[in-house]
Protein backbone atom coordinates (compact mmCIF):
# COMPACT_ATOMS: atom_id res chain seq x y z
CA UNK A 1 0.00 0.00 0.00
CA UNK A 2 1.80 3.11 -1.20
CA UNK A 3 0.80 6.40 0.30
CA UNK A 4 1.65 9.80 -1.14
CA UNK A 5 3.47 11.18 1.91
CA UNK A 6 6.52 12.09 -0.13
CA UNK A 7 4.37 13.91 -2.64
CA UNK A 8 2.74 16.02 0.04
CA UNK A 9 6.07 17.53 1.00
CA UNK A 10 6.87 18.65 -2.50
CA UNK A 11 3.52 19.47 -3.97
CA UNK A 12 3.19 23.14 -4.90
CA UNK A 13 -0.36 23.23 -3.57
CA UNK A 14 0.64 22.13 -0.11
CA UNK A 15 0.61 25.00 2.34
CA UNK A 16 3.35 23.75 4.62
CA UNK A 17 6.50 21.87 3.91
CA UNK A 18 7.00 18.56 5.65
CA UNK A 19 4.45 16.81 7.81
CA UNK A 20 1.56 19.09 8.74
CA UNK A 21 0.24 19.17 12.29
CA UNK A 22 -3.25 20.17 11.23
CA UNK A 23 -4.70 16.64 11.45
CA UNK A 24 -3.48 16.42 15.04
CA UNK A 25 -5.03 19.76 15.97
CA UNK A 26 -8.30 18.85 14.23
CA UNK A 27 -8.51 15.51 16.00
CA UNK A 28 -7.70 17.28 19.27
CA UNK A 29 -10.53 19.75 18.65
CA UNK A 30 -12.97 16.91 17.96
CA UNK A 31 -11.95 14.99 21.08
CA UNK A 32 -12.26 18.12 23.22
CA UNK A 33 -15.73 18.83 21.78
CA UNK A 34 -16.81 15.26 22.51
CA UNK A 35 -15.55 15.41 26.09
CA UNK A 36 -17.24 18.76 26.73
CA UNK A 37 -20.53 17.58 25.22
CA UNK A 38 -20.45 14.38 27.26
CA UNK A 39 -19.05 15.38 30.62
CA UNK A 40 -19.46 19.15 31.06
CA UNK A 41 -23.22 18.58 31.21
CA UNK A 42 -24.12 21.52 28.95
CA UNK A 43 -27.80 20.63 29.03
CA UNK A 44 -28.10 22.01 32.58
CA UNK A 45 -27.85 25.47 31.07
CA UNK A 46 -31.24 26.32 29.54
CA UNK A 47 -30.09 28.43 26.61
CA UNK A 48 -27.24 26.09 25.70
CA UNK A 49 -29.55 23.11 25.78
CA UNK A 50 -32.01 24.94 23.52
CA UNK A 51 -29.22 25.98 21.17
CA UNK A 52 -27.81 22.46 20.84
CA UNK A 53 -31.20 20.80 20.31
CA UNK A 54 -32.33 23.29 17.64
CA UNK A 55 -28.91 23.25 15.95
CA UNK A 56 -28.93 19.46 15.90
CA UNK A 57 -32.47 19.21 14.60
CA UNK A 58 -31.85 21.69 11.78
CA UNK A 59 -28.82 19.70 10.67
CA UNK A 60 -30.42 16.29 11.07
CA UNK A 61 -33.36 17.40 8.98
CA UNK A 62 -31.44 19.33 6.33
CA UNK A 63 -28.51 16.94 5.75
CA UNK A 64 -30.55 14.15 4.11
CA UNK A 65 -31.98 16.75 1.72
CA UNK A 66 -28.49 18.06 0.98
CA UNK A 67 -27.40 14.49 0.28
CA UNK A 68 -30.42 13.84 -1.91
CA UNK A 69 -29.82 17.07 -3.81
CA UNK A 70 -26.13 16.20 -4.20
CA UNK A 71 -27.07 12.74 -5.51
CA UNK A 72 -29.36 14.26 -8.14
CA UNK A 73 -26.69 16.84 -8.91
CA UNK A 74 -23.99 14.17 -9.37
CA UNK A 75 -26.32 12.09 -11.55
CA UNK A 76 -26.97 15.13 -13.75
CA UNK A 77 -23.23 15.69 -14.04
CA UNK A 78 -22.28 12.21 -15.15
CA UNK A 79 -25.43 11.10 -16.98
CA UNK A 80 -26.80 14.15 -18.77
CA UNK A 81 -24.68 15.58 -21.59
CA UNK A 82 -23.99 19.31 -21.51
CA UNK A 83 -25.52 19.60 -24.97
CA UNK A 84 -28.95 18.87 -23.50
CA UNK A 85 -28.79 21.98 -21.33
CA UNK A 86 -27.20 24.03 -24.09
CA UNK A 87 -30.29 23.40 -26.21
CA UNK A 88 -32.56 24.54 -23.38
CA UNK A 89 -30.30 27.56 -22.97
CA UNK A 90 -31.05 28.58 -26.55
CA UNK A 91 -34.78 28.91 -25.84
CA UNK A 92 -36.14 32.47 -25.44
CA UNK A 93 -35.76 33.75 -21.88
CA UNK A 94 -39.46 34.48 -21.73
CA UNK A 95 -39.95 30.73 -22.00
CA UNK A 96 -36.98 29.54 -19.94
CA UNK A 97 -37.88 31.14 -16.65
CA UNK A 98 -41.51 30.00 -16.39
CA UNK A 99 -40.43 26.55 -17.56
CA UNK A 100 -37.73 26.44 -14.87
CA UNK A 101 -40.21 27.51 -12.20
CA UNK A 102 -42.71 24.92 -13.41
CA UNK A 103 -40.00 22.24 -13.26
CA UNK A 104 -39.92 22.85 -9.53
CA UNK A 105 -43.31 21.17 -9.30
CA UNK A 106 -41.60 17.88 -10.09
CA UNK A 107 -38.86 18.25 -7.45
CA UNK A 108 -40.39 17.57 -4.05
CA UNK A 109 -37.57 18.56 -1.71
CA UNK A 110 -37.15 21.63 0.43
CA UNK A 111 -34.75 24.48 -0.15
CA UNK A 112 -31.50 22.84 0.98
CA UNK A 113 -31.82 20.15 -1.70
CA UNK A 114 -32.52 22.54 -4.55
CA UNK A 115 -29.29 24.56 -4.11
CA UNK A 116 -26.79 21.90 -5.28
CA UNK A 117 -29.09 20.92 -8.14
CA UNK A 118 -29.37 24.53 -9.34
CA UNK A 119 -25.61 24.94 -9.10
CA UNK A 120 -25.06 21.87 -11.23
CA UNK A 121 -27.69 22.92 -13.79
CA UNK A 122 -25.98 26.28 -14.22
CA UNK A 123 -22.55 24.66 -14.42
CA UNK A 124 -23.82 22.29 -17.11
CA UNK A 125 -25.03 25.09 -19.37
CA UNK A 126 -28.57 25.98 -18.32
CA UNK A 127 -29.04 29.74 -18.26
CA UNK A 128 -28.05 30.74 -14.68
CA UNK A 129 -31.14 32.91 -14.33
CA UNK A 130 -33.29 29.87 -15.16
CA UNK A 131 -31.35 27.70 -12.70
CA UNK A 132 -31.88 30.27 -9.95
CA UNK A 133 -35.57 30.53 -10.85
CA UNK A 134 -35.82 26.76 -10.44
CA UNK A 135 -33.92 26.90 -7.14
CA UNK A 136 -36.24 29.53 -5.66
CA UNK A 137 -39.50 28.10 -6.99
CA UNK A 138 -38.99 24.39 -6.26
CA UNK A 139 -39.25 24.63 -2.45
CA UNK A 140 -42.59 26.42 -2.73
CA UNK A 141 -44.44 25.04 -5.74
CA UNK A 142 -43.72 21.33 -5.25
CA UNK A 143 -46.73 19.17 -4.35
CA UNK A 144 -45.50 18.24 -0.86
CA UNK A 145 -45.33 21.88 0.18
CA UNK A 146 -48.68 22.67 -1.43
CA UNK A 147 -50.20 19.77 0.50
CA UNK A 148 -48.60 20.82 3.80
CA UNK A 149 -49.92 24.36 3.34
CA UNK A 150 -53.37 22.93 2.68
CA UNK A 151 -53.26 20.82 5.84
CA UNK A 152 -51.96 23.71 7.96
CA UNK A 153 -54.84 26.01 6.94
CA UNK A 154 -57.56 23.39 6.58
CA UNK A 155 -60.75 24.54 8.25
CA UNK A 156 -59.90 28.24 8.04
CA UNK A 157 -61.73 30.76 5.94
CA UNK A 158 -58.53 31.86 4.24
CA UNK A 159 -57.51 28.33 3.21
CA UNK A 160 -57.51 28.94 -0.54
CA UNK A 161 -56.01 32.40 -0.23
CA UNK A 162 -53.03 30.79 1.47
CA UNK A 163 -52.67 27.72 -0.75
CA UNK A 164 -53.21 29.41 -4.12
CA UNK A 165 -51.58 32.63 -2.97
CA UNK A 166 -48.41 30.87 -1.84
CA UNK A 167 -48.11 28.85 -5.03
CA UNK A 168 -48.77 31.84 -7.29
CA UNK A 169 -46.57 34.31 -5.43
CA UNK A 170 -43.78 31.73 -5.18
CA UNK A 171 -43.95 31.32 -8.93
CA UNK A 172 -44.02 35.07 -9.59
CA UNK A 173 -41.23 35.98 -7.18
CA UNK A 174 -38.93 33.21 -8.49
CA UNK A 175 -39.42 34.33 -12.10
CA UNK A 176 -38.90 37.97 -11.13
CA UNK A 177 -35.57 37.20 -9.47
CA UNK A 178 -34.57 35.29 -12.61
CA UNK A 179 -35.37 38.37 -14.68
CA UNK A 180 -33.41 40.60 -12.32
CA UNK A 181 -30.36 38.38 -12.75
CA UNK A 182 -30.77 38.81 -16.49
CA UNK A 183 -28.15 37.42 -18.82
CA UNK A 184 -25.48 36.77 -16.21
CA UNK A 185 -23.15 33.93 -17.25
CA UNK A 186 -22.49 30.90 -15.09
CA UNK A 187 -18.85 31.94 -14.64
CA UNK A 188 -20.02 35.25 -13.22
CA UNK A 189 -22.60 33.65 -10.95
CA UNK A 190 -21.06 30.47 -9.58
CA UNK A 191 -18.31 30.77 -7.02
CA UNK A 192 -15.25 28.76 -7.95
CA UNK A 193 -14.32 26.14 -5.41
CA UNK A 194 -10.91 26.00 -3.84
CA UNK A 195 -8.48 24.69 -6.40
CA UNK A 196 -7.25 21.96 -4.11
CA UNK A 197 -10.74 20.79 -3.25
CA UNK A 198 -11.93 20.74 -6.84
CA UNK A 199 -8.88 18.93 -8.11
CA UNK A 200 -9.14 15.83 -5.97
CA UNK A 201 -12.88 15.40 -6.38
CA UNK A 202 -12.76 13.86 -9.83
CA UNK A 203 -10.33 12.98 -12.54
CA UNK A 204 -11.72 13.21 -16.07
CA UNK A 205 -10.36 9.79 -17.02
CA UNK A 206 -11.98 7.96 -14.09
CA UNK A 207 -14.81 5.48 -14.43
CA UNK A 208 -18.29 6.99 -14.44
CA UNK A 209 -19.18 5.53 -11.03
CA UNK A 210 -16.03 7.02 -9.50
CA UNK A 211 -16.81 10.43 -10.99
CA UNK A 212 -20.37 10.13 -9.64
CA UNK A 213 -19.13 9.57 -6.10
CA UNK A 214 -16.51 12.29 -6.53
CA UNK A 215 -19.14 14.86 -7.40
CA UNK A 216 -21.51 13.57 -4.70
CA UNK A 217 -18.83 13.81 -2.02
CA UNK A 218 -17.65 17.21 -3.19
CA UNK A 219 -21.15 18.69 -3.18
CA UNK A 220 -22.06 17.27 0.23
CA UNK A 221 -18.91 18.49 1.95
CA UNK A 222 -18.98 21.83 0.18
CA UNK A 223 -22.61 22.52 1.12
CA UNK A 224 -22.40 21.10 4.63
CA UNK A 225 -19.83 23.54 5.93
CA UNK A 226 -22.07 26.46 4.96
CA UNK A 227 -25.15 24.69 6.27
CA UNK A 228 -23.43 24.31 9.64
CA UNK A 229 -22.78 28.05 9.85
CA UNK A 230 -26.36 28.87 8.82
CA UNK A 231 -27.87 26.36 11.24
CA UNK A 232 -25.75 27.71 14.09
CA UNK A 233 -26.93 31.28 13.44
CA UNK A 234 -30.56 30.18 13.08
CA UNK A 235 -30.34 28.18 16.30
CA UNK A 236 -28.88 31.18 18.12
CA UNK A 237 -31.69 33.40 16.86
CA UNK A 238 -34.31 30.87 17.92
CA UNK A 239 -32.64 30.63 21.30
CA UNK A 240 -32.39 34.31 22.10
CA UNK A 241 -35.19 36.00 20.14
CA UNK A 242 -38.72 35.17 21.32
CA UNK A 243 -41.39 34.75 18.62
CA UNK A 244 -43.57 37.20 20.49
CA UNK A 245 -41.20 40.01 19.54
CA UNK A 246 -43.14 40.53 16.30
CA UNK A 247 -46.63 40.42 17.83
CA UNK A 248 -46.68 44.15 18.56
CA UNK A 249 -46.68 45.03 14.88
CA UNK A 250 -49.31 42.51 13.80
CA UNK A 251 -51.88 45.16 12.91
CA UNK A 252 -49.60 47.68 11.20
CA UNK A 253 -50.22 47.41 7.44
CA UNK A 254 -46.79 47.30 5.80
CA UNK A 255 -44.66 46.80 8.90
CA UNK A 256 -46.41 43.52 9.64
CA UNK A 257 -45.33 42.18 6.23
CA UNK A 258 -41.73 43.21 6.78
CA UNK A 259 -41.75 41.80 10.31
CA UNK A 260 -42.97 38.41 9.13
CA UNK A 261 -40.40 38.31 6.32
CA UNK A 262 -37.68 39.15 8.83
CA UNK A 263 -38.93 36.43 11.16
CA UNK A 264 -38.95 33.87 8.35
CA UNK A 265 -35.38 34.88 7.50
CA UNK A 266 -34.22 34.40 11.06
CA UNK A 267 -36.09 31.19 11.86
CA UNK A 268 -34.84 29.26 8.78
CA UNK A 269 -37.66 26.74 8.74
CA UNK A 270 -38.06 23.95 6.23
CA UNK A 271 -40.59 24.86 3.54
CA UNK A 272 -42.49 21.66 4.27
CA UNK A 273 -43.20 22.70 7.85
CA UNK A 274 -43.27 26.49 7.85
CA UNK A 275 -47.00 26.70 7.10
CA UNK A 276 -47.76 25.18 10.49
CA UNK A 277 -45.70 27.85 12.20
CA UNK A 278 -47.16 30.63 10.03
CA UNK A 279 -50.66 29.44 10.93
CA UNK A 280 -49.83 29.85 14.60
CA UNK A 281 -49.38 33.62 14.13
CA UNK A 282 -53.10 34.16 14.41
CA UNK A 283 -52.75 37.87 15.18
CA UNK A 284 -51.33 38.43 11.68
CA UNK A 285 -53.53 38.58 8.59
CA UNK A 286 -53.21 36.31 5.54
CA UNK A 287 -50.98 38.79 3.67
CA UNK A 288 -48.38 38.83 6.45
CA UNK A 289 -48.51 35.04 6.72
CA UNK A 290 -48.04 34.80 2.95
CA UNK A 291 -45.02 37.10 3.20
CA UNK A 292 -43.59 34.62 5.73
CA UNK A 293 -44.37 31.60 3.54
CA UNK A 294 -43.12 33.03 0.25
CA UNK A 295 -39.89 34.72 1.35
CA UNK A 296 -38.79 32.14 3.95
CA UNK A 297 -38.00 29.27 1.54
CA UNK A 298 -36.08 31.67 -0.74
CA UNK A 299 -34.02 33.71 1.73
CA UNK A 300 -33.19 32.72 5.27
CA UNK A 301 -30.19 32.44 7.54
CA UNK A 302 -29.06 28.96 6.60
CA UNK A 303 -29.77 29.52 2.89
CA UNK A 304 -27.73 32.73 3.00
CA UNK A 305 -24.73 30.73 4.15
CA UNK A 306 -25.32 28.23 1.33
CA UNK A 307 -25.68 31.04 -1.23
CA UNK A 308 -22.45 32.68 -0.06
CA UNK A 309 -20.65 29.37 -0.56
CA UNK A 310 -22.26 28.57 -3.90
CA UNK A 311 -22.52 31.88 -5.71
CA UNK A 312 -20.29 34.86 -6.34
CA UNK A 313 -20.20 37.87 -4.05
CA UNK A 314 -23.18 40.09 -4.69
CA UNK A 315 -25.62 37.28 -5.45
CA UNK A 316 -26.89 37.14 -1.89
CA UNK A 317 -27.51 40.89 -1.85
CA UNK A 318 -29.36 40.79 -5.19
CA UNK A 319 -31.52 37.85 -4.16
CA UNK A 320 -32.41 39.31 -0.77
CA UNK A 321 -33.38 42.67 -2.28
CA UNK A 322 -35.27 41.16 -5.22
CA UNK A 323 -37.14 38.56 -3.16
CA UNK A 324 -37.99 41.00 -0.37
CA UNK A 325 -39.13 43.77 -2.73
CA UNK A 326 -41.24 41.50 -4.94
CA UNK A 327 -42.78 39.68 -2.00
CA UNK A 328 -43.54 42.97 -0.26
CA UNK A 329 -45.27 44.49 -3.28
CA UNK A 330 -47.22 41.31 -4.02
CA UNK A 331 -48.36 40.80 -0.44
CA UNK A 332 -49.34 44.48 -0.15
CA UNK A 333 -51.87 43.78 -2.89
CA UNK A 334 -53.02 40.70 -1.00
CA UNK A 335 -53.33 42.87 2.12
CA UNK A 336 -55.49 45.38 0.26
CA UNK A 337 -57.83 42.64 -0.96
CA UNK A 338 -57.84 40.09 1.87
CA UNK A 339 -56.40 41.91 4.88
CA UNK B 1 0.42 2.22 -10.50
CA UNK B 2 -2.13 3.68 -8.12
CA UNK B 3 -1.72 5.09 -4.62
CA UNK B 4 -4.05 6.07 -1.83
CA UNK B 5 -5.28 9.65 -1.92
CA UNK B 6 -5.31 11.15 1.57
CA UNK B 7 -7.85 13.73 0.51
CA UNK B 8 -10.29 11.13 -0.74
CA UNK B 9 -9.84 8.92 2.32
CA UNK B 10 -10.47 11.91 4.60
CA UNK B 11 -13.60 12.91 2.66
CA UNK B 12 -14.83 9.31 2.75
CA UNK B 13 -14.30 9.16 6.51
CA UNK B 14 -16.24 12.40 7.01
CA UNK B 15 -19.15 10.91 5.09
CA UNK B 16 -18.79 7.73 7.13
CA UNK B 17 -19.04 9.83 10.30
CA UNK B 18 -22.31 11.35 9.12
CA UNK B 19 -23.53 7.88 8.19
CA UNK B 20 -22.63 6.68 11.69
CA UNK B 21 -24.61 9.55 13.21
CA UNK B 22 -27.72 8.69 11.22
CA UNK B 23 -27.43 4.96 11.98
CA UNK B 24 -26.92 5.76 15.68
CA UNK B 25 -29.95 8.06 15.84
CA UNK B 26 -32.06 5.45 14.11
CA UNK B 27 -30.93 2.35 15.98
CA UNK B 28 -30.75 4.04 19.41
CA UNK B 29 -34.27 5.43 19.07
CA UNK B 30 -33.16 9.06 19.21
CA UNK B 31 -34.85 10.10 15.98
CA UNK B 32 -37.76 11.59 17.89
CA UNK B 33 -35.47 13.89 19.85
CA UNK B 34 -34.94 15.90 16.66
CA UNK B 35 -37.66 15.05 14.14
CA UNK B 36 -41.39 14.43 14.11
CA UNK B 37 -43.08 11.17 13.20
CA UNK B 38 -43.78 12.70 9.77
CA UNK B 39 -40.14 13.26 8.96
CA UNK B 40 -38.58 10.32 10.80
CA UNK B 41 -37.98 8.64 7.42
CA UNK B 42 -35.24 11.19 6.74
CA UNK B 43 -32.92 9.45 9.20
CA UNK B 44 -32.77 6.07 7.40
CA UNK B 45 -32.61 7.89 4.08
CA UNK B 46 -29.66 9.95 5.31
CA UNK B 47 -28.01 6.81 6.71
CA UNK B 48 -28.30 4.94 3.42
CA UNK B 49 -27.11 7.80 1.19
CA UNK B 50 -24.22 8.73 3.49
CA UNK B 51 -23.14 5.09 3.77
CA UNK B 52 -23.27 4.58 0.01
CA UNK B 53 -21.41 7.84 -0.57
CA UNK B 54 -18.71 6.91 1.97
CA UNK B 55 -18.24 3.45 0.49
CA UNK B 56 -18.16 4.86 -3.03
CA UNK B 57 -15.61 7.50 -2.09
CA UNK B 58 -13.34 5.10 -0.23
CA UNK B 59 -13.60 2.58 -3.06
CA UNK B 60 -12.37 5.22 -5.49
CA UNK B 61 -9.60 6.48 -3.20
CA UNK B 62 -6.76 4.81 -5.09
CA UNK B 63 -5.69 6.97 -7.99
CA UNK B 64 -2.60 7.19 -10.18
CA UNK B 65 -1.83 10.76 -9.18
CA UNK B 66 -3.14 11.48 -5.66
CA UNK B 67 -3.29 15.04 -4.35
CA UNK B 68 -2.24 15.87 -0.80
CA UNK B 69 -4.62 16.97 1.91
CA UNK B 70 -3.88 20.63 2.64
CA UNK B 71 -4.11 22.34 6.03
CA UNK B 72 -7.13 24.43 5.06
CA UNK B 73 -8.97 21.41 3.74
CA UNK B 74 -8.17 19.44 6.86
CA UNK B 75 -9.76 22.13 9.02
CA UNK B 76 -12.78 22.32 6.72
CA UNK B 77 -13.34 18.59 7.05
CA UNK B 78 -12.93 18.94 10.80
CA UNK B 79 -15.66 21.58 10.90
CA UNK B 80 -17.96 19.36 8.83
CA UNK B 81 -17.52 16.47 11.25
CA UNK B 82 -17.73 18.60 14.42
CA UNK B 83 -21.56 18.52 14.72
CA UNK B 84 -21.45 14.74 14.33
CA UNK B 85 -19.12 14.44 17.29
CA UNK B 86 -21.24 16.77 19.43
CA UNK B 87 -24.53 15.03 18.63
CA UNK B 88 -23.04 11.59 19.23
CA UNK B 89 -21.56 12.66 22.57
CA UNK B 90 -24.58 14.53 23.90
CA UNK B 91 -26.84 12.62 26.27
CA UNK B 92 -30.51 12.41 25.18
CA UNK B 93 -31.88 15.93 25.49
CA UNK B 94 -35.11 17.74 24.63
CA UNK B 95 -36.38 21.31 24.58
CA UNK B 96 -37.45 22.48 28.01
CA UNK B 97 -38.83 25.36 30.02
CA UNK B 98 -36.35 27.85 28.59
CA UNK B 99 -37.64 27.25 25.06
CA UNK B 100 -41.27 27.38 26.17
CA UNK B 101 -40.88 31.05 26.97
CA UNK B 102 -39.67 31.82 23.44
CA UNK B 103 -42.19 29.92 21.34
CA UNK B 104 -45.58 30.69 19.83
CA UNK B 105 -48.65 28.82 20.95
CA UNK B 106 -49.91 26.00 18.80
CA UNK B 107 -52.67 26.99 16.39
CA UNK B 108 -55.74 24.80 16.70
CA UNK B 109 -56.96 25.80 13.28
CA UNK B 110 -54.52 23.37 11.80
CA UNK B 111 -56.59 20.43 12.90
CA UNK B 112 -60.32 20.69 12.68
CA UNK B 113 -60.12 20.44 16.42
CA UNK B 114 -63.81 20.50 17.23
CA UNK B 115 -64.48 17.27 15.35
CA UNK B 116 -61.82 15.46 17.37
CA UNK B 117 -62.94 16.81 20.71
CA UNK B 118 -66.62 15.91 20.37
CA UNK B 119 -66.02 12.30 21.37
CA UNK B 120 -63.28 10.00 22.56
CA UNK B 121 -60.46 10.56 25.01
CA UNK B 122 -59.03 14.07 25.11
CA UNK B 123 -55.32 14.41 24.59
CA UNK B 124 -52.91 17.32 24.79
CA UNK B 125 -53.11 18.12 21.09
CA UNK B 126 -56.91 18.31 21.25
CA UNK B 127 -56.82 20.68 24.19
CA UNK B 128 -54.18 22.86 22.59
CA UNK B 129 -56.00 22.89 19.29
CA UNK B 130 -59.25 23.95 20.90
CA UNK B 131 -57.73 27.03 22.47
CA UNK B 132 -57.48 29.07 19.30
CA UNK B 133 -60.77 28.37 17.52
CA UNK B 134 -64.31 29.17 18.59
CA UNK B 135 -65.53 25.76 17.38
CA UNK B 136 -62.85 24.04 19.41
CA UNK B 137 -63.62 26.07 22.51
CA UNK B 138 -67.33 25.22 22.17
CA UNK B 139 -66.58 21.52 21.73
CA UNK B 140 -64.24 21.52 24.72
CA UNK B 141 -66.69 23.44 26.92
CA UNK B 142 -69.24 20.70 26.32
CA UNK B 143 -66.87 18.31 28.10
CA UNK B 144 -65.98 20.60 30.99
CA UNK B 145 -65.57 18.76 34.30
CA UNK B 146 -64.42 15.48 32.76
CA UNK B 147 -61.40 13.80 34.30
CA UNK B 148 -58.34 13.78 32.05
CA UNK B 149 -54.80 12.52 32.46
CA UNK B 150 -52.06 14.48 30.74
CA UNK B 151 -48.28 14.14 30.61
CA UNK B 152 -45.85 16.99 30.08
CA UNK B 153 -43.08 18.98 31.67
CA UNK B 154 -43.42 21.69 34.27
CA UNK B 155 -43.10 25.39 33.54
CA UNK B 156 -43.96 28.24 35.86
CA UNK B 157 -45.01 31.72 34.80
CA UNK B 158 -44.84 34.94 36.79
CA UNK B 159 -48.03 35.29 38.79
CA UNK B 160 -48.66 31.56 39.20
CA UNK B 161 -49.70 30.72 42.76
CA UNK B 162 -47.80 28.28 45.02
CA UNK B 163 -50.17 25.45 44.06
CA UNK B 164 -50.12 26.28 40.33
CA UNK B 165 -47.92 25.44 37.38
CA UNK B 166 -48.18 25.01 33.61
CA UNK B 167 -48.08 21.56 32.11
CA UNK B 168 -46.38 22.02 28.75
CA UNK B 169 -45.69 20.02 25.61
CA UNK B 170 -44.06 21.01 22.35
CA UNK B 171 -45.85 20.21 19.12
CA UNK B 172 -43.59 19.80 16.09
CA UNK B 173 -44.42 19.25 12.45
CA UNK B 174 -41.05 18.51 10.83
CA UNK B 175 -38.27 19.17 13.31
CA UNK B 176 -37.69 20.79 16.68
CA UNK B 177 -36.97 24.13 15.01
CA UNK B 178 -40.67 24.52 14.16
CA UNK B 179 -41.88 23.67 17.67
CA UNK B 180 -44.94 25.44 19.03
CA UNK B 181 -46.22 25.07 22.57
CA UNK B 182 -49.34 23.57 24.10
CA UNK B 183 -50.04 24.40 27.72
CA UNK B 184 -52.64 23.84 30.40
CA UNK B 185 -52.78 25.50 33.78
CA UNK B 186 -52.72 23.05 36.67
CA UNK B 187 -54.15 24.18 40.02
CA UNK B 188 -54.48 22.40 43.33
CA UNK B 189 -51.10 20.69 43.24
CA UNK B 190 -49.42 20.47 46.65
CA UNK B 191 -46.92 23.36 46.90
CA UNK B 192 -43.38 22.20 46.22
CA UNK B 193 -44.51 18.96 44.63
CA UNK B 194 -42.98 19.76 41.23
CA UNK B 195 -39.89 21.50 39.90
CA UNK B 196 -39.37 23.32 36.62
CA UNK B 197 -38.51 21.07 33.64
CA UNK B 198 -39.61 17.95 35.50
CA UNK B 199 -41.78 15.52 33.52
CA UNK B 200 -45.02 14.68 35.35
CA UNK B 201 -48.38 13.02 34.82
CA UNK B 202 -51.39 15.00 36.05
CA UNK B 203 -54.90 13.69 36.58
CA UNK B 204 -57.74 16.07 37.27
CA UNK B 205 -60.95 17.67 36.09
CA UNK B 206 -60.65 19.84 33.00
CA UNK B 207 -62.28 23.28 32.78
CA UNK B 208 -61.90 25.51 29.69
CA UNK B 209 -61.71 29.20 30.67
CA UNK B 210 -61.68 31.33 27.54
CA UNK B 211 -58.35 30.78 25.83
CA UNK B 212 -57.02 28.96 28.88
CA UNK B 213 -57.60 25.38 29.98
CA UNK B 214 -57.47 24.67 33.68
CA UNK B 215 -56.84 21.29 35.27
CA UNK B 216 -57.92 20.91 38.90
CA UNK B 217 -55.41 18.29 40.02
CA UNK B 218 -56.51 15.25 41.99
CA UNK B 219 -53.57 15.11 44.37
CA UNK B 220 -49.89 15.42 43.66
CA UNK B 221 -48.57 15.00 40.10
CA UNK B 222 -46.60 11.80 39.44
CA UNK B 223 -43.05 12.08 38.23
CA UNK B 224 -42.47 10.20 34.97
CA UNK B 225 -39.40 9.60 32.81
CA UNK B 226 -38.98 11.65 29.65
CA UNK B 227 -41.06 9.82 27.01
CA UNK B 228 -39.37 8.18 24.03
CA UNK B 229 -41.33 10.58 21.86
CA UNK B 230 -41.24 13.83 23.84
CA UNK B 231 -42.78 15.95 21.08
CA UNK B 232 -46.33 15.71 19.81
CA UNK B 233 -47.23 15.76 16.14
CA UNK B 234 -50.62 17.08 14.99
Image (tube, rainbow, N blue to C red):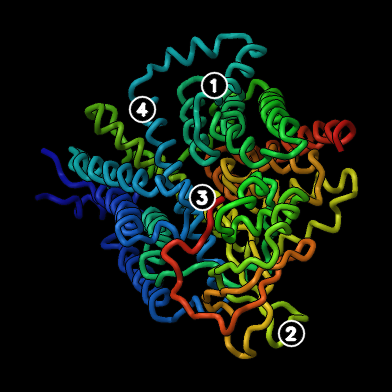
Asked if marks 1 and 2 touch (Cβ < 8 Å), the reply is: no
Read off the residue under disc 1: A103
Between discs 1 and 4, the one toward the N terminus: 4
Residue B229 x %, y %: 45, 61
Residue A313 x %, y %: 62, 41
Asked if marks 4 and 3 touch (Cβ < 8 Å), the reply is: no
Read off the residue under disc 4: A75
- Rounded to the nearest angstrom, the CA distance separating label 2 from label 3 is 47 Å
Q: How crowded is mark 4: few (under 14 residues within 10 Å), some or many (20 or more)?
A: many
Q: Which chain carries label 2?
A: B
Determine the secondary structure under disc 3. Answer: helix
Read off the residue under disc 3: A226
Q: Residue B76 occupies which quadrant of the picture?
A: bottom left
- Left or right: residue B94 versus residue A149 is left
- Rounded to the nearest angstrom, the CA distance separating label 1 from label 2 is 57 Å
Q: Which chain carries label 1?
A: A
Determine the secondary structure under disc 1. Answer: helix
Determine the secondary structure under disc 2. Answer: loop
Amino acid sequence: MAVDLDRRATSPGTPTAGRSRSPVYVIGMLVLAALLARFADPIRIGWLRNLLVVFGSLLVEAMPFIMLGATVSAAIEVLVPSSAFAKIGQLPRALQMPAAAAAGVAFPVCECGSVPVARRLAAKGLAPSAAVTFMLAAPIVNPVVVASTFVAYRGRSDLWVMVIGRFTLGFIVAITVGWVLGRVRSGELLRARDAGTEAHEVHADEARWARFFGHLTGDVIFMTRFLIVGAAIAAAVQTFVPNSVVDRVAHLPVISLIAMMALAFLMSLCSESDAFVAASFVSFGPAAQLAFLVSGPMIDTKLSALYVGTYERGFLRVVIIAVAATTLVATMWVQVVFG
Amino acid sequence: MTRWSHARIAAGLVLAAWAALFWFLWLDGRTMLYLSTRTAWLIPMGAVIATAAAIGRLASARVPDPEPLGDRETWMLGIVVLPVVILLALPPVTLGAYAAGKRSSFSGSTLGASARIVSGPIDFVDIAASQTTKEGQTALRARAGEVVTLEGFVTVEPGDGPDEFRLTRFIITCCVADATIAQVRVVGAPPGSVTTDEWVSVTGRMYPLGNDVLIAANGAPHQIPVPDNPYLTP
